[in-house]
Image (cartoon, helix red, strand yellow):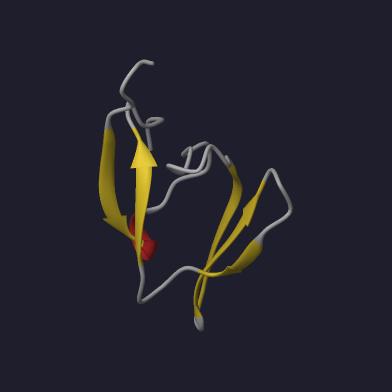
């Protein structure tokens, strides 16, 4: 089994196209006054601020 390289980022640094360590891809990132809101391919969504997230490398460009 191939080892997946990952990086820990905070919620404000998530990018559209990032793939979480779980394999779920972030399809949309919204920055609004209340915080950073994300949606994923598997239908998960919510505020991402105040948390750390493990994303797979390489990451998509900004």
Where, quadrant-wise, is the C terminus in this rendering?
Answer: top left
Residue shown at 51% from the left, 83% from the top: 34
Percent across and percent down for residue 53 are 37, 56
Residue at (32% x, 29% y) in the render: 57
Side of 17 where 59 appears, left or right: left
Point out residue 24 in the picture as x, y percentages from the top left corner: 58, 42
Q: Is residue 49 left or right of residue 17?
A: left
Q: 11 left or right of 19?
A: left
For the point 41% across and 52% down, the residue is 14
Displayed quadrant of residue 10: bottom left
Q: Residue at x 38, y 63 (%)?
A: 11
Q: Is residue 20 left or right of residue 7?
A: right
- Work out which quarter of the rendered image holds the N terminus and state it: top left
Q: Is residue 1 above or below residue 43?
A: above
Location of residue 34 with respect to 54 vertically, above or below: below
Q: Position of residue 35 (x, y in %)?
A: 47, 77
Residue 55 location, x and y as percent?
A: 37, 43
View extreme (top): residue: 1
């Amino acid at each position: 089994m191939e080892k997946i390289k990952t990086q820990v980022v905070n919620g404000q640094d998530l990018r559209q196209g990032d793939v979480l360590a779980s394999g779920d891809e972030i399809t949309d990132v919204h920055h609004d006054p209340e915080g950073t809101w994300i949606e994923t391919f598997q239908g998960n969504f919510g505020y991402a601020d105040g948390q750390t997230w493990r994303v797979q490398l390489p990451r998509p460009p900004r």
